[in-house]
Image: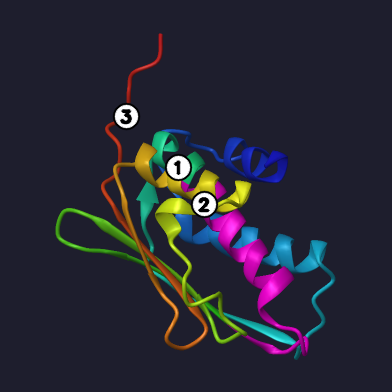
Amino acid sequence: MAMIHENLYQSDNLTNINFKEYLEKLVSDIFYSYEIKKGSIESVLDIEDININIDTAIPLGLIINELLTNSVKYAFHQGEGTIIIKLRSLQDKIELTISDNGIGIPKDFDIKNTKTLGLQLVNNLTNQIDGNIEVDISNGTEFKITFKELKYKERK
């Protein structure tokens, strides 16, 4: 979490953060932290050039950190696979998708009633950004979060 805040606060403009640049660095830092070797787990980033305010960027960064870290740690018992991260702007919402082609999660998994602290955090942060989360476990694991950017609150 410290890395997320450090990266965000190093931005020249805290009102609007270039989330594409931030996300590329976050993925690189996580892969480095877990000593992911080139050719083992591939990251595919399909990120629109979107500026997001800090009120939305901080919880979104924490969500991405948790889901990406879970994929890196648990999805690939053989140490090989692909993680895909997509971020795109829809008409009045933003859609984040994080998927992997790993071993998947149990068929009875319920994101709304999870017992793991990390995924409870993902749920709470998704609610914080007025988002909706969907999980598809038909081919690996895919988390799709659709949310609206929070209105920036003027700080005094």
Q: Secondary structure at mark 1?
A: helix
| In-image side of 150 versus 113 (left or right) | left
Find residue 152 and name its label.
3
100 magenta-colored: no
User: Which residue lies under the disc numbered 1?
Assistant: 125
Of the numbered discs 1 and 2, the one sitting upstream in the chain is 2
Name the amino acid type tagged 2.
Answer: Ile
Percent of width and height locating residue 39: 75, 91
Cα–Cα gap, marks 3 and 2: 19 Å
In the rendered image, the vertical position of residue 120 relative to residue 27, given as above or below = above
**Nearer to us: label 1 or label 3:** 1
The residue lying at 43 percent from left, 62 percent from top is 110
Name the amino acid type tagged 3.
Answer: Tyr
Percent of width and height locating residue 150: 30, 37
Provide the residue span drawn in magenta. 60-82
The residue lying at 82 percent from left, 81 percent from top is 37
Name the amino acid type tagged 1.
Answer: Leu
The residue lying at 50 percent from left, 40 percent from top is 58
Q: Main secondary structure of the magenta part?
A: helix
Percent of width and height locating residue 99: 49, 76
Cα–Cα gap, marks 1 and 3: 17 Å
Q: Nearer the viewer, residue 107 or 29?
A: 107
Cα–Cα gap, marks 1 and 2: 7 Å
In the rendered image, the vertical position of residue 131 relative to residue 139, given as above or below = above
The residue lying at 38 percent from left, 37 percent from top is 128
Q: Nearer the viewer, residue 98 or 22?
A: 98
User: Which residue lies under the disc numbered 2?
Assistant: 63
